[in-house]
Image: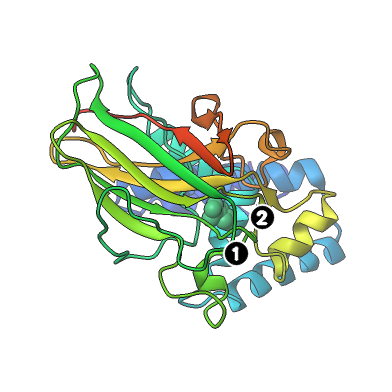
Amino acid sequence: MTRYFSEDTSEQAVIARLENCDDPRFRTVMEGAIKHLHAFVKEVEPTLDEWMAAIEFLTKTGQICDDKRQEWILASDTLGVSMLVDAINHRKPHGATENTVLGPFHVAGAPELQMGDDICRDGIGEPCVVRGVVADEDGNPISGAELDVWQTNGEGFYDVQQPTEQPQMNLRGKFRTGSDGAFWFKTVKPVPYPVPTDGPVGQLLEAMGRHPYRPAHIHFIVSATGFEQVTTHVFVDGDPYLESDAVFGVKDSLVLPFEQDGDAWSVTFNIGLAKAA
Ligand code: BEZ
Ligand code: FE
């Protein structure tokens, strides 16, 4: 083996430079990154123009990010990496509700509401009641569980995407279960909507021949003392985008029937929490 860099031994040449890295976990991470990056380049054999296009994509993705816009997370989401990291870190026991992506539209400090309150403040959309019980893995109700919920309005926009059109904290709220573990609130039936497409990730999706839509869903973060927090959604059964969610967030157990009774819709979403490790 030559002392210098060569096409054949490129990854070994770079990995050898980690010899003075004294953080073993960081070293493992970097070795993996270098090994797979070199394998990727050897498989694809990019032209210089293609390599430059990749650099430009990475540059633009960084440049569009600020405290409100996180294009890197969107890139990770749309390439399935967020859901893979999530799956590896949330291998749930039977009886515990599965996780899915957090997404970029969670806002801390949603109003604390009373059971049965309506989170819809703009009246846009079809009325819907959401109910369920928060329980442990064995089905025992959990008292004092907090549910932080958020969704788009009936036109498919989060309040933070339309700060001048929607009331602040529209379709957001926190609820706390009583001794029966039950919760219920009023809202509007969620609708499918596109992830932001006005940046480099939107262009990437288009170049890959992919649509940007997410199937209709309501977001939940559910937490209770002594239990692992779950970040999840309930999806509307029958939605046309369930099998092609732009961010791969759908899981069978999270797709539920929304029933129509007169003008109003309703869904029952029972939530299981795993005991904290
Ligand atoms: C969302 O469901 O809010 C979302 C998730 C990932 C990317 C964009 C939006
Ligand atoms: Fe969403």
Which three-letter amino acid code belongs to the residue tagged 2? Tyr
Q: Name the residue under label 2.
A: 193
Q: In terms of depth relative to the viewer, which is nearer, 66 or 166?
A: 166
Few, some or many C-alpha atoms within 10 Å of disc 1 (few <14, some 14-19, many ≥20)?
A: some
Q: In this image, 111 relative to 31: left or right?
A: left
- Is there any visible trace of residue 81 in the rendered image? yes
In this rendering, the count of numbered labels is 2
Q: Mark 1 and mark 2 in contact (Cβ < 8 Å)?
A: yes
In the displayed image of the protein, which residue is found farthest to the bottom? 164
Q: Which residue is drawn at 77% across and 40% down?
A: 43
Position of 125 with respect to 133 (left or right) is right
Residue 102 screen position, x and y as percent: 45, 51
Q: Is mark 2 on a helix, strand or loop?
A: strand
Label annotation for residue 149? none
Looking at the rendered structure, which numbered label has been put on residue 157?
1
Q: Is mark 2 within 8 Å of ligand 2?
A: yes
- On the question of residue 10 being in view, the answer is no
Type of amino acid at the residue the image marks with label 1: Phe
- Identify the residue at horizontal 61%, vertical 58% (top origin): 154
Its colouring scheme is rainbow
The residue positioned 29% from the left and 55% from the top of the image is 174
- Marks 2/1: CA–CA distance: 7 Å
Query: In the current view of this chain or complex, which residue is farthest to the front?
Result: 262
| Picture quadrant where residue 58 is located | bottom right
- What x and y, as percent, mark residue 145? 20, 41
Residue 168 percent coordinates (x, y): 42, 75
Image coords of residue 265 (percent x, y): 54, 40
